[in-house]
Every structure is written in structure tokens, then in C-alpha cells.
Image (tube, rainbow, N blue to C red):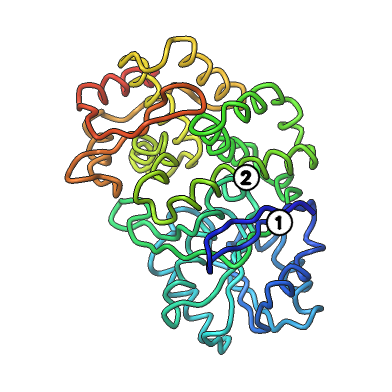
Amino acid sequence: MEKLFVDLGKKSYDILFSDSFNGFAKAMSDINAPKKLLVVTDSNVEKLYADEVNDLLIKNGYDSKIYAFTAGEENKGMDTILGICGACIEHEMDRKSMIVALGGGVVGDMAGFAAAIFMRGIDFVQVPTTLLSQSDSSVGGKTGIDFMESKNILGAFHQPKLVYINVATLKSLPNEQFVSGMGEVIKHGIIRDSEFFDYIEKNSDKIKTLDNETLIKMDKINCSIKADVVEQDEKENGLRAILNFGHTIGHAVESAYDFKMTHGECVGIGMVGASYIAYKRNMIDESTLNRIENVLDMYGFKIRVDLPEKEVVYGYMQKDKKKIAGKLKFVLPTKVGEVMQTTDVSKTEIFAAFDYITK
């Protein structure tokens, strides 16, 4: 089993990479997990893996129960959080109990947020089952829910005690969810690691066949990039904001489409838009812009979409929680493997990017 250490002092934890759940009970024992557990999942993952994971825990002496909520971004709200907290009370959990987040990014965000507020904070572990959650949301301690048409506007930083990644779960993903996850993988290469970007560019066939060994290698490199950023800036006071490359436009597109498009797909669109702004500013050349688009296209992304009215999308951008003193923060590439942050992107530039990414 491969291992990656996230060094956050007293809040440090391991990320484990495997091709099965067989090592999960031992991993829980290694972190001295309490016996009282609540496995939080959604209605999709419940059918696939909840019983397997819960039975494994029970066979190893844990008092574990399953709580499943209805799958979908539209359920990423306070009602679901209260449902999770209610299940914790019914299971007679206390401050020493633990939540197991089994599922994709929505599950991880909400289970982590519930853990952060139940009894003023209990421990939780991440068991991500989608490429999006394995490559991004399960690492770094960001938790949250959507509120008043704003994505992840309510939340908390709450680091997990462990992240256990079983890459075999990716074989049960619909293709659109695999594409969504690759959005974050490609993003990490663009913002921080040109050699990793080269790797995913040259090994697309092997990655898309979901070869376990290749997926473990990709996930480990990918998580190491995010972990390095998080270690330097846990609560997004500076460097960590580069992880938002593609998100300023992407989140707005996601909201404008009423979450009918996947998060990663929208981030891909946002990366094209941000790269176009960088190109028009002469920060990158046309070949770099084309290369970014070609890699996204290679993995099945739509790089041109039918955007709603530009003012509507721009309106959603104004609700972005990353605004500073009323100004939108953009992350723009200066080359593959390096980006910069700015708050001086004009409305004219943003609308030109909208035109560029529109069919």
C-alpha cells in the first residue's frame, strides 16, 4: 500500500492508496479510531460500497452504523447536515466518536462539516470513491455546503484523521464523473507541476483504461501536489488560493446551469476561460493555450459550451466567496506548471473570455 504524509503539525495525517478496502480496518486501528462510528454516504454509493465497508468495520469490533442521504448537489444543504447530526445523536455518539465519509466530494464536504460542528467538533476520516474526491476534495480539510445559490459558502476547515483511497472504486464511475475528476487532476499539473502535466498528457490511454497501478501513481503524485500547497497555507491566506485555478468562472457556470453540469467539467471550462485571459495579456503564448485545451479535450471535456446570458453568469461570479474587497480573484497561468493571482481582471476581459468559451 502506498502512503503519503500530510504534515500539518498536530493535525497531520496519512493518505493511503490501495486497490481494495481490505486494509481499511487496520488503517483505522493504526490511528486509534474509536469504536463508535457513523458511516455517512449517499444513496448512490450506499448501493455499491456501504455494506462492504460497514461489515468490515463491524467484523473488526467497531460499533458502526450507516447514514445515507439522497445523492445530488441539490441536497448539499443544511437540511442534510441536520440529518447527519440527528443520526449521530440517535447512534448515541459522543465527542470521542468518529464519522466516516464514504463517497464523492459532496459526501466528504457534508460529512466533514457535520463532524466540525457536532458537539463542537469530532474526528472524521475520508474514504473518497470518485476521482474528483480522490484528487481534490478529500485532501486539505475544506468542508462546506451550498446556500442561497452560492457554492460552498458555509463551511469550516476541519482536517481528517486519515484519507483512505481505493482506486478500484473508480471502475464503477459513470464516464462523466471520471471526466469531472480529471478536471482537478489536470488543474494540479497546470498550476504546480509541468512534469505531471506531461505525464497525464502522454499516458491518457493507460489512465482512461483505469489501470490500478497507473491510477495509484497518478493519485499519489496528484495528492502530493495539493498536500504541499496545503502544508504551506492550510487556511487559504495566500498560496492555497492557486488551487482555485478555473474556479472563478467555473463555479459561476456551475451555478448558472443549476448544477446540471459536473463540478470538474465546469472547472475545465473555467480553466479555458482563465487561460484565454492570460493569453490575451501575453502571459502565455497561443501554443500553451492550445495545449491546455487539447489535454482537456483528450480526456473528454467540453471546451466550448452554450453559456447563459453573460450578465447572468457574471452575476453569479459576484457571489464568489473568494472576492477580496469587492474584487474577484483570478488565478492565471504564466506557463504550464506556474500561475499567478490577481484581482485586476476587468469585466471586459471576463466577457471576452465568455465569448471565447461559448460555442
Front residue of 203/39: it is: 203
Q: Is residue 342 above or below residue 321?
A: above
Q: Residue at x 52, y 85 (%)?
A: 95
Horizontal arrangement in the rendering, residue 333 relative to residue 9 (left or right): left
Q: Amino acid at mark 2?
A: Leu
Q: Residue at x 45, y 79 (%)?
A: 118
Quarter that holds the N terminus: bottom right
Nearer mark to the viewer, of 1 and 2: 1
Horizontal arrangement in the rendering, residue 197 relative to residue 118 (left or right): right
Residue 342 pos. (x, y %): 28, 33
Front residue of 189/354: it is: 189
Q: Is residue 175 above or below residue 95?
A: above
Q: Residue at x 66, y 63 (%)?
A: 46
Q: Amino acid at mark 1?
A: Leu
Q: CA distance from mark 1 to mark 2?
A: 15 Å
- Answer with the quarter of the image where residue 208 lies: top right
Q: Write down the residue under mark 1.
A: 16
Question: What element does badge 2 sit on?
Answer: helix
Q: Which mark is residue 56?
A: none
Horizontal arrangement in the rendering, residue 198 relative to residue 20 (left or right): left
Residue 7 pos. (x, y %): 57, 58
Residue closest to the far left: 326
Question: What element does badge 1 sit on?
Answer: strand
Q: Which mark is residue 131?
A: 2
Quarter that holds the C terminus: top left
Q: Residues within 10 Å of mark 2 (few under 14, many from 20)?
A: many
Residue closest to the far top: 286
Q: Residue at x 44, y 35 (%)?
A: 266
Q: Earlier in the sequence, mark 1 or mark 2?
A: 1
